Image (cartoon, helix red, strand yellow):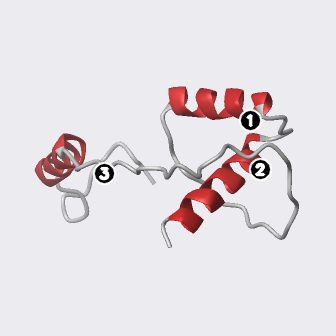
Amino acid sequence: MDYDKKDSRMFDEASAQKQMADAFSRDEPQSEVSLGDGFKLPSSNHSSRKIQTTYTIRPEIKQGIEKLATKQGFRSSSAFVDLVLEQVLNQSK
């Protein structure tokens, strides 16, 4: 199969260009999370059943998370994020 040849029935160049332009030009409203006075960064590691998941974040956020996790004594940033998000979710109830 020759991938250099585009079948016009399956690929519309103009439509693809428009979709890409739309995808990267949207300004999504960013809502801010307000953490309550009782919010504290976790400093201990708890173990419980976990599932693997993936999120996409900016590189500077990832670096900040890793620095905070190390500062708080965590061996992994995922354990730290797990406990931080648990606290955020508990406060939003």
Task: List the residue tagged with mark 3.
Answer: 31
Secondary structure beneath dot 3 equals loop
Determine whether, in the image, residue 61 is placed left or right of residue 80.
left
Give above or below for 85 relative to 78: below
User: How far from the left and from the top, in percent, is residue 30?
Assistant: 29, 48
- The circle drawn on residue 69 is 1
Q: Which amino acid does the dot numbered 1 rest on?
A: Ala
| Residues packed near mark 1 inside 10 Å, few (<14), some (14 to 19) or many (20 plus) | many
Secondary structure beneath dot 2 equals helix
User: How far from the left and from the top, in percent, is residue 14?
Assistant: 11, 48
Q: In which image quadrant can residue 65 be found?
A: top right
Secondary structure beneath dot 1 equals helix
**Which sits earlier in the primary sequence, circle 1 or circle 3?**
3
Determine whether, in the image, residue 64 is placed left or right of residue 23.
right
Task: List the residue tagged with mark 2.
Answer: 79
- The circle drawn on residue 38 is none
**Which sits earlier in the primary sequence, circle 2 or circle 3?**
3
